Amino acid sequence: MLLGRASERTAIDGLLADAVAGTSRSLVLRGEAGIGKSALVDYAAATTGMRVVRGVGVESEAELPFGALHLLLYPYLDRVGGLPAPQAEALRAAFGQIEGPEANRFLVGAATLTLLAELAAETPTLVLIDDAQWLDRSSSDALLFAARRFHADPIAVLFAVRETALPFATPGLDTLRLGGLPRAAAAELLDARAPGLTVPGRERVLSESAGNPLALIELGTSRRAAERAGHTDPGHEVGPLPVARRVQDSFRAQIAELPTGTSTLLLLAAADTGAGIETILRAAAAFGLTAADLEPAEHADLVSMSTDRLTFRHPLIRAAAYQQAAHHQRIAVHQAFAQALTSPEDADRRAWHLAAATADPDEQVAAELEDAARRAQHRGGAMAVSAAYDRAGRLSVDPAQRARRLLLAARAAYDAGRPDRATRLATEAAARTDDNGIIADATHIRAQVEYERTSPAADATLALAAAELVVDCDPERAVFILTEAVCCARDAARPDLLAPGVRQFESLRLPQDSPLRPHVAGQIAWADFLAGRPEAAVAAMAAQIRAARIGPADYLHEVVAAFNGVMLADDAATAAVMATAVDRARATGAVAWIPYTLEFVALAQLLSGKFLAAETSVAEAVSLGLELGMDTEVAVLRAITVWSAAVTGDERRSRALAAEIGPFLSERHPTHGALVSWGLAVGELAAGRFQTALDLLDEVCTGPAAHDFLIRAVPDHVEAALRGQRPERAGAHLAAFENWAHHVRNPLATALAQRCRALLAAADDAAEEHYAAALRHHDKHGGAYDQARTQLLFGEWLRRRRRRAEARTQLVSAAAAFDRTGARVWADRARIELAALGEPQTTQPSDPLKLLTPQEIQVVRLAATGHSNKEIGARLFLSPRTVGHHLYKAYPKLGVTRRAELAQLGL
């Protein structure tokens, strides 16, 4: 019977009812020890007819990668073969069932999602995780990854989390914080479990327990025993203590009354709560103890025994048993376990017991821990890898080995998403060695942390220092560090950081046949390009794009190619390179690269007028970026949304988002800060607020990133100046733009240059020649949005010269193209011009995809090309049922009734 928990039971009942009805939800129960979390978990398990998949975090197994997930999914491992092949392979590798490449932790999360979703497809399923704060990091990452992606599956996930000094973060999940029981319920529980207390004793227990059920039971029982023994003198009572501490003291007192052999056996069990009873008894033999020595602890209701397990009644008992032991006693039990764990399957557990039993440096123990780290790395448990290398480093005798192992611990911590730990370990590794290679790698890790923590400029500064250490002795390693440095310098619009990076690139001595040479040359060229000298840079940048498209797969240099593509107005090349990279990242589970690659997919889509596609790409990237804690990258991605929202007519969203991210980006990431201003300016220009647009575009075209891809804002600046009656400002940046257009030799760039000349020649007949030339180049390029912008201006020019029929042709074509691309603000302007010709106001049929959410668009497009729900789910990290739910919602919006009709829509 749960007293005083009516609202909590209602919340759990609602969670379960929603799951049975096909709406997935997760709930996190949080509270102090003894507050009743496990009781509510038991209530959920007992009150549902659902399939229950139950797991628990075990403190002593927190360094064993995927240990908790393996126990949770063990009864269903026969189903792994039915998962998508990459997911199945990752899960088997994580559980040590196969030898092969290192397990990918994101693919393990996707496999967990798919496996649990398949169980739920058979019967509604409840996943219960108690003591989640003690899950190993790899298991918790996989379970949280899955929990956040259940949407339309008949599945509920309930986590119980004890509040500890190390927080267990559950972003994106609903949380219910448990407080103490109301006084009436607390009194009822106390009277039931410790009847007959004196009034003062009863009041003291009620006061000091603060409604904590475990404290009410334990303190009440202790008080009752003391009163019966006549120990009621207030002098025997301690002052106020935290509730958990008082309860733990009560447990310590009970353990202290046990025979010495029994308390030693409890210490053994507490030292490895994941060990079976057989293992515990093997270790106990070193002390001459047997199972009979456990009987007093069972009679005291401190532990319970089953066929193969010994279980503490409450985790605080386990903590009391371990913490009250003297240091030499703990060392002795860990040594006993190390001697008892002899099978290869127990190698990791043995290594950690040896480490716990070792106070001084010991190379043999350090080597065993390093072996454990390698096994954890193969299984994909990055935090377990970091912990093992960290401890191995501290037990190393040789200083060089110590620094190397601490560096490996730092890299694993960074991969696990623990930047503070990574920085601390990297700093320590560098301080303990004079090896330039280790110092360079440690500095590079710190640089990568600084990108998100501080700014791209901070990243570039540290990366330059790291590269300088190895530029002569290890040029290939220097290439990858310098690539990051130069990319970050470009993001930060800092020529003072770009220049030393380029100089280091120029000093590299790479072999003549090195595949890295075109990538190096392409980035050296940035110094000229970003300084407004494209004539010296375009050839090398274009060669780098070609190298990235035909060379070995390499995310970093593919991103460089994407940079080059947008700077050269070769959006098709950017989209092609990044589409390949995104597909590979999804297939291999390289989830951390997906936001970066989708950034350039979206930017290329935006700049080529595919606004709905850009919003869809941004939505997926932002979702993953938020989960991965990539705050800077998420802001960069949302800059694209400012632009697309402005041009598609959602001015309120565009302005609100610009206000939210604009100051952040202007300070940290000026290139995309300028993109925000350009996006706002496009909306102002289309709305006829020319002076505001001009002021914004002045910021863009004179800012520190003016010669980056933002050179493409100059045509808008020219239009804003002329339409705003400021002709003296119209040509301020045109020479630089025309020089850029001439050297990139791209049809779009040439078309835009001709449009600018047409605007400047508006007063004479030369304008028509420029408009005609621009449209010919637009035809070669095929970009509907930019072509429609030119047609709109040409149509306006023709109308003002009373060439009504020709004007109508251009304006009708422009309005239709704006409708197709979703550029509503420009479509409205085209219709105003048509109305001036006497054309009736009509609304073109809108793209049906505009009615869908970004995720529905992704699902529909994949379904239209013949992918199954399972294949789509594997690609987008969704359950097959959620994919089906998105299709079900999309069909009526698209006017179709079945999957086969999607292919006919030309999506």
Image (cartoon, rainbow, N blue to C red):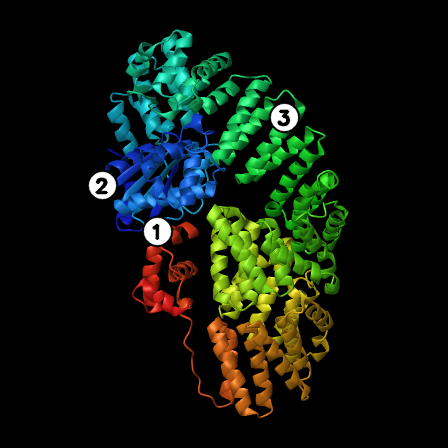
Which residue in the protein does label 2 denote? Answer: 49
Q: Residues within 10 Å of mark 2 (few under 14, many from 20)?
A: some
**Residue 106 visible to an observer of this rendering:** yes
* Residue 818 against residue 278 in the figure, above or below: below
Q: CA distance from mark 3 to mark 1?
A: 47 Å
Q: Residue at x 59, y 47 (%)?
A: 452
Q: Residue at x 49, y 62 (%)?
A: 615
Residue 198 location (% of width, % of height):
28, 20
Given residues 52 and 681, the one toward you in this image is 52
The amino acid beneath tag 2 is Gly
* Residue 114 against residue 166 in the figure, above or below: below
Residue 402 marker = 3
Label 1: element kind: helix
Q: CA distance from mark 2 to mark 1?
A: 23 Å
> In the rendered image, which quarter is residue 145 located in?
top left
Given residues 51 and 887, the one toward you in this image is 887
Q: Residues within 10 Å of mark 1 (few under 14, many from 20)?
A: many
Q: Mark 2 and 3 residues: CB-CB less than 8 Å, in contact?
A: no
* Residue 734 against residue 839 in the figure, above or below: above
Left or right for 564, reference 237: right
> In the rendered image, which quarter is residue 429 located in?
top right
